[in-house]
Image: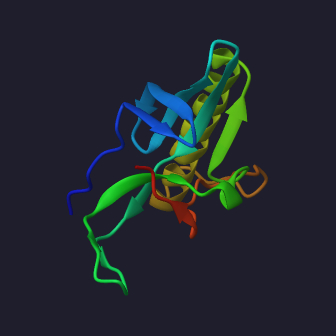
Amino acid sequence: MYYEPMPEVFTYDKFQFRLIDRAGDIAIYKKQRGVRNISFEVVIIQKHPPATWPDGRITHAREALPASESWGEGGWTYPTVDRARRKMASLLSDLSTTRQNASGTFADPKEPHSCVTSQTAFAEVK
């Protein structure tokens, strides 16, 4: 299924977001309001299927940011791009390890590993 991709630049809640980096469904956005209020958000891009709402609106399949309620599980905020890049690298490493474990090519029961999972609550970004 084709999902409309997240825009590279958009405004939400009076903040401007600009895509800094993306690898698969993990991305870094620079979040800025004014000159001094800058942070970097690492997000696991969510996939929304097409939907027909009770009021008759139809939305197409699209990507979206995680909901505020899932921050800390599907999104993280950092004060510097370097810290955001480290988090992104960690998530990509965790995802790689999870895929290796699932394929049976790498598994060590003594080694803890984490899994990047999709969240159940999402926020639409316009």
Q: Residue 13's spot in the image, x, y percent?
A: 57, 43
Is 79 in front, or is 86? 79
Quadrant position of residue 32 = top right
What residue is drawn where x is 64% and y is 34%?
90
Q: Quadrant of the N terminus?
A: bottom left
In the figure, 118 relative to 88: above or below?
below
Q: Residue 118's spot in the image, x, y percent?
A: 53, 61
Quadrant position of residue 101 = bottom right
Do we see residue 105 in this rendering?
Answer: no
| In this picture, residue 35 sits left or right of residue 92 | right
Is 36 in front, or is 121? 36
Is 50 in front, or is 72? 50
Q: Residue furthest bottom?
A: 54
In the figure, 108 relative to 53: above or below?
above
| In this picture, residue 93 sits left or right of residue 36 | left
What residue is drawn where x is 66% and y is 16%?
82
Q: Residue 24's spot in the image, x, y percent?
A: 39, 41
What residue is drawn where x is 59% and y is 29%?
89
Q: Residue 79's spot in the image, x, y percent?
A: 74, 22
